[in-house]
Amino acid sequence: MIHLISLSIPIGAYALRSYPSLSFILLLSAFSISLIIDYLRLNNIFVKNWFAHLFGMLLRPHESKKFTGSTYLLLSACCGYVLFSLSVFCAVMSFLVIGDTMAALIGKRFGKRRIINHKSLEGSMAFFFSSSIIVFFIPALPILTGLCGALIATTIELLPLKLDDNLSIPLLTGFAMTILNSAI
């Protein structure tokens, strides 16, 4: 559910497409707040205890000593909003939010065939198919670029990269889709 709330990022960016400065200010504000909270959580015992009391059960084990996925997601949103066209930005952020959620839900429930990095074929297929469906709902996004982007995002999610997937999926996929768009 928390991940799906992040779908407000591409929806909001598209809704505010006539006000790109406002969209960026909102994204940058959200990222700044998240970064400050994460920094304080990692460096101040009072904030750490407060955060653990309110949100501790939502943290993944590796987030206890590093920034949370939401901070990385908001960083990638700020960067992607500046670097990519609105259609590519909306696509890659939606791939991350919906694709990653579907991969986790299907992979944990039905994942039987482990392929790379302890991830399942079923979860990866869920990521790809859900991301492929998204392509048809992104205005001004060429279908071929979008489907290639869905495949690239699925591959990036599957790879054992050291970079947090909330950064790697949207940024690497966005660069690839931008190159594809210019080639088409």
Image (spheres, rainbow, N blue to C red):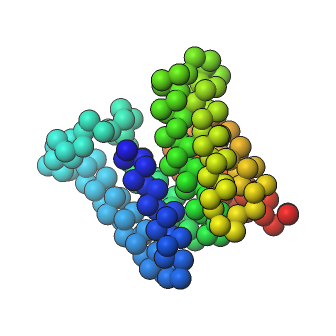
Q: Residue at x 26, y 35 (%)?
A: 57
Using the image, determine if residue 126 lies above or below residue 143. Answer: above
Tally of marks: 0
Q: Residue at x 81, y 67 (%)?
A: 182
Q: Residue at x 75, y 57 (%)?
A: 143
* Residue placed most toward the observer, 40 or 169: 169
| Left or right: residue 176 compared with residue 32 | right
* Residue placed most toward the observer, 60 or 96: 96
Using the image, determine if residue 134 lies above or below residue 164. Answer: below
The single residue placed furthest to the right in the displayed view is 184
Using the image, determine if residue 158 lies above or below residue 36. Answer: above
- Coordinates of residue 51 in the picture (x, y in percent): 21, 47
- Coordinates of residue 22 in the picture (x, y in percent): 44, 79
Q: Quadrant of the C terminus?
A: bottom right
- Coordinates of residue 73 in the picture (x, y in percent): 47, 54
Q: Residue at x 58, y 30 (%)?
A: 123
Decide if residue 157 is in sight here. Answer: no
Q: Quadrant of the N terminus?
A: top left
Decide if residue 18 is in sight here. Answer: yes
- Coordinates of residue 67 in the picture (x, y in percent): 38, 48
Q: Quadrant of residue 183?
A: bottom right
* Residue placed most toward the observer, 119 or 107: 107
| Left or right: residue 104 compared with residue 114 | left
